[in-house]
Image (cartoon, rainbow, N blue to C red):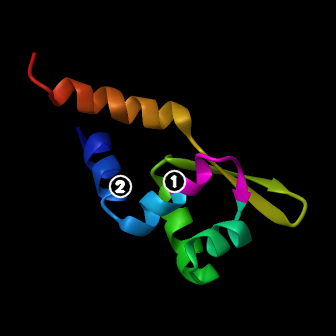
Amino acid sequence: MTELAIGFGLLSDQTRVGILKLLTTGPKNVTAICKGLGMKQPLVSHHLGLLRMGRLAAGARKGKSVIYTIDRSHLKGLAAGIAKLTPK
């Protein structure tokens, strides 16, 4: 249940949901995410860090950049936890 609560907490923020929505179109670096959201880099980096800690997003270094993607396996686990909450 703790993992599910953390996931809900992460998804309760409009900026983090916006980041995840942008990442559904493919991997992006922080500059592309900032442009897509019209936000400054420090704020976007903060939210990306939270998403990474919660394992909803992943980052991989490519040269000087970090390329972010959605961690689909963890998102599926979150969806499975939500499904367990629905009455049968």
Q: Which percent across, then down, holds residue 4?
A: 28, 41
Task: Say what amino acid the circle numbered 1 marks.
Answer: Leu
Horizontally, is 57 left or right of 31 in the view?
left
Circle 1/circle 2 CB separation < 8 Å: yes
| Mark 2, residue position | 11
Residue 24, x across and y down, in percent: 58, 46
- Decide: is 88 above or below 71: above
Residue at image location 16% in from the left, 29% down from the top: 85
Residue 31 spot, x, y in % from top left? 72, 72
Magenta span: 20-28
Q: Earlier in the sequence, mark 1 or mark 2?
A: 2
Visible residue check, residue 60: yes
Q: Secondary structure at mark 1?
A: helix
The disc label shown at residue 29, or none: none
Residue at the disc numbered 1: 20
The residue nearer to you, when weighing 18 against 8, is 18
Badge 2 amino acid: Leu
Mark 2 Cα within 10 Å, few/some/many (few <14, many 20+)? some
In the rendered view, would you say 84 is above or below 36? above
| Secondary structure beneath label 2 | helix
**Residue occupying the point 45% across, 51% down:** 54
Q: Position of residue 14 (x, y in %)?
A: 38, 66
